[in-house]
Image: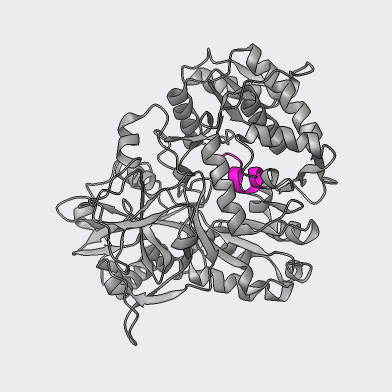
Amino acid sequence: MSDYRTFTELMIDRAGRTPERTALLMLPDSDERGRPATVSYGALDTQARRLAGRLIADGATGQPVLLLHESRSRFAVSFLACLYAGAVAVPVPPHGGRTHHEERVAGIVRQTSPRTVLTCASLAPDVSRLLARHGHGSVPCLAADAVAGTGTERLPEPDPDAVAYLQFSSGSTGSPNGVVVTHRNLLANQEALARLLGAGPDARIGGWLPFHHDMGLVGQLLHPLWLGGTAVTLSPEAFVRRPARWLEAIGKYGIEASGAPDFAYDLCTRRVTDEELAGLDLSGWRVAISGGEPVCARTRRAFTERFAAAGLRPEAMHAAYGLAEATLLVSGGPSADGERTVDAEALEQGRVREARPGRPAHTLVSCGGVDTAAGPVLIVDPESRSVLPDGQVGEIWVGGPGVASAYWRDRSASAERFGAVTADGTGGMLRTGDLGTVADGRLYVTGRLKDVIMVAGRNLYPQDVERTVQRVSSLFGTGSAFSVPGERERVVVVQELRTGRQYSLDLEELVSDVRRCLSEEFEVAVAGVLLVRPGTVRRTSSGKVERVAMRRLFLNGGLRPLHQYLADDLVGAAGPGRP
């Protein structure tokens, strides 16, 4: 694999050597929609060349080109066409009709000033109107599936340090950051993925993650193509409608490696019926990756126990840590190998200490050994920049050839995150903004630096608060915990209520139960509890709760709770949107 200088060279060679081999296997969105569609390496190359010829003729070489597709096969063709043409691919989520999705797309357009937008003929009118609404009506919108012609044999000379694509990282919808990923970054991270997954050239790898997200793009589309295998893809909508379809696809189509964020494993555990379970065969699932957000030990155990009857082996479960700024993967490994139960109070104070009987405890899941990571991993004090010893919690800093060097046209943000130097002079590091620790040579992620709730001199991790709240009622879905500044930090919880019969419930009692639970578990008096409708809590495409966005909505009065409790000193903090 290392003989290739760019992903373009690799794909052209694949098409020349094995043109008939299946590159893409796209599963239908419902059980009633017929057979899967296939695309060979030869056909993928032909279609990408045709579109690349149009991009070159339009002057897109070296320029950003937005990819806004609902069709998975058309996205793959458009992405490769950008690589072939030397254009900068910019994957963005298809417009889902929600305001914050439209704002995110508009923000990306504003930052990149794209040469054109590639989309599907069915979406082109809506995309054109979206661009016009936000003052970008002059940006051409090209229906990629309607481009005629025979393509081009004359492609730009590939350059390993050329920008392959921009991966817009998770963040507030108005100001996402575009990570500049070069061909060199991409190929280096593919090598790291190969070491983690251990898949061969005939492997089938895939899942349902969207291709505009790094885990879906790099892990479930590009990695099988890099191997010379087959990417088996299911739409995110199909998974959400019936989570069992993901697991059914793994058995039916021989997917040996697949992954998703923690919430997807929890969703399968809760929503896959006994009847659906009886029809599953997960014995061929070699590597089941949990990544994209802190990995919950309880979720892993529940999923493993639930699907053991379907042949799932406990050793198949792997935890991984990565981020878009590192292309994708930083480290990963079997999740059961490094599970540690630690003292919760010590963790709040930034230290890892074994739990003592009768004391509050927290279980951490290892994301692999630092000796097998994609590059160097350090735990650093974010203020002094001193490298911390094992067993202390600090900011995770990473390096290596898969780490990007900048955000697109954002010098200030780039200077803050990339090329960091430790107090002892170790340079070229990426500040991840994530908190973690190294113990016994293994990396443990504990939370986000900016998400940590500081109250009464303690550091509370919002995901711990959220999981504790969700145990209060089986009707609770996604939740978000965050702090609101003032003379003192105040904790607020926004909790979705999973029911269509909410007005027959005693919502006041549910809120009281939440307050009591948090008081007993964390010894904090929560200042606000808002029960909201499903879909209110903002999440990224990988399932991460957007706590910064939720705090902003709360402070701006953008939430419409079904019921709420607000402490007296918080009543004036939120905007006028309360009932």
Q: Is residue 246 left or right of residue 340?
A: right
Q: Residue 154, image x and y in percent? A: 70, 17
Residue 38, quarter of picture: top right
Picture coordinates of residue 209, whole percent (x, y): 61, 48
Q: Quadrant of residue 274?
A: bottom right
Q: Is residue 224 magenta?
A: no
Nearer to me, 29 or 262: 262
Q: Is residue 365 left or right of residue 457?
A: right
Q: Is residue 352 above or below residue 290?
A: below
Observer able to see residue 320:
no
Residue 187: x and y in percent read: 58, 42
Magenta range: 211-223
Which percent across, then down, holds residue 156? Answer: 63, 20
Give the residue furthest to the front: 3
Residue visible at 22% across and 47% down in the picture:
572
What residue occupies the far left of the structure in this picture? 487
Q: Height in image: 126 above or below 19?
A: above
Display colour scheme? one colour
Q: Nearer the viewer, residue 502 or 14?
A: 14
Instruction: Name the outermost residue toward the bottom.
Output: 357
Q: Is residue 394 visible?
A: yes
Residue under the point 56% across and 74% down: 301
Quadrant of the rendering where the N terminus is positioned: top right
Overall secondary structure of the magenta section: helix
Tell how many labels: 0
215 part of magenta stretch: yes
